[in-house]
Image (cartoon, grey):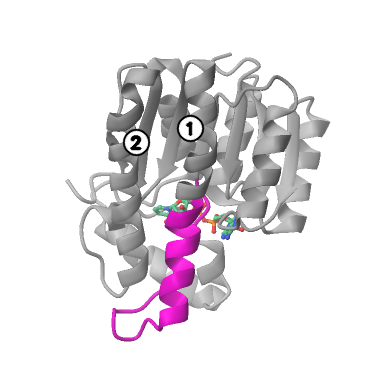
Amino acid sequence: MRFHDKIVLLTGAATGLGRATSELLASEGARLFLVDRAAEALQSLVASLSASGCQAQGIVGDASHQDTVDAAVAAAMRPTGRIDILINNAGINPTGTVVDTDAAQWASTIDVNLKSAYLFSHSVIPLMVKQGGGVIVNTASIAGQRASTAEAAYAVSKAAIIMLSRTTARDFAGQGIRCNALCPGVLETVMADRRTRMSADDVAKRSAKAAALVPMGRLGRYDEVAKCLAFLASDDASYVNGAQLTVDGALTA
Ligand SMILES: NC(=O)c1ccc[n+]([C@@H]2O[C@H](COP(=O)([O-])OP(=O)(O)OC[C@H]3O[C@@H](n4cnc5c(N)ncnc54)[C@H](O)[C@@H]3O)[C@@H](O)[C@H]2O)c1
């Protein structure tokens, strides 16, 4: 039970990696405060965790808005006055080169993928300093490590969150805070926002094409990537700080 009674605040919890991570941490005793703007999916996750005896509360809202941050931090602090682990995982995955990304799409991508992590870190780190330490994991991507095609805003946001993780690690290591970036490769489903713009057939074709490029011959499963995220969040990673953990089946090796 690596997370027994640990207070965990996690954004982008309702589906995909956030959901798999929530289920794993809950099974290891965490008390979860889960943020997502997808109200129905979040409520269904909280209901299923609660039905299996886990402690979870949902906070519905946009993770890039200060009022959501304030509500989530207040809820998470209520039981013990602590927040032990912050996981900034909310993300969207728009497509487009720098030319065909309009200013609104550019801004919303940076807001959701980067500003949300800034806002949560900005609010939670002073509390972690006061309580004597804490752990932050930021979900980045291999898209932030090397250029991908026609994902300009996404890739820039992920490169920036890697650097946010590294600067946070340096700035607060002396106060007992660890901060790392998780960099998944191509995972089993395309992200929820992109699914709304693609037919099921196109999703399947895109997944098969991506899997063929991976030396391991398959896409990453959410459950196996969640284990890597949990490692970074746990005391097993007690000397891992400012790192990028790439989990991509050797795609970028
Ligand atoms: N799926 C992949 O292939 C892949 C690869 C590398 C990195 N990632 C990263 O992993 C993380 C999780 O992605 P996923 O694959 O689980 O995708 P997903 O779309 O299933 O999950 C993202 C979650 O974030 C939520 N969300 C989006 N915008 C939000 C906002 N403004 N406020 C609150 N919640 C918001 C969504 O509702 C969703 O539940 C993301 O940061 C993503 O960039 C995914």
Residue 106: percent from left, percent from top: 41, 74
Please indicate whether residue 244 sits to the left or right of residue 236 in the image.
Answer: left
Asked if the residue under mark 1 is in contact with the one under mark 2, i.e. CB atoms within 8 Å, the reply is yes
Residue 188: percent from left, percent from top: 46, 54
Residue 1: percent from left, percent from top: 58, 13
Q: Amino acid at mark 1?
A: Ile
Chain part drawn in magenta: 89-116
Rendered-image quadrant of the C terminus: top left
Instruction: Give yes or no for residue 97 being in the magenta stretch.
Output: yes
Instruction: Return the residue nearer the eye: 102 or 182.
Output: 102
- The CB of the residue at mark 2 lies under 8 Å from ligand 1: no
Q: Residue at x 29, y 79 (%)?
A: 98
Q: Amino acid at mark 2?
A: Thr
* The label number, if any, that marks residue 168 in the structure image: 2
* The label number, if any, that marks residue 125 in the structure image: 1
Residue 49: percent from left, percent from top: 74, 34
Q: Residues within 10 Å of mark 2 (few under 14, many from 20)?
A: many
Give the quadrant of residue 23.
top right
Q: Residue 83: in sight, yes or no?
A: yes
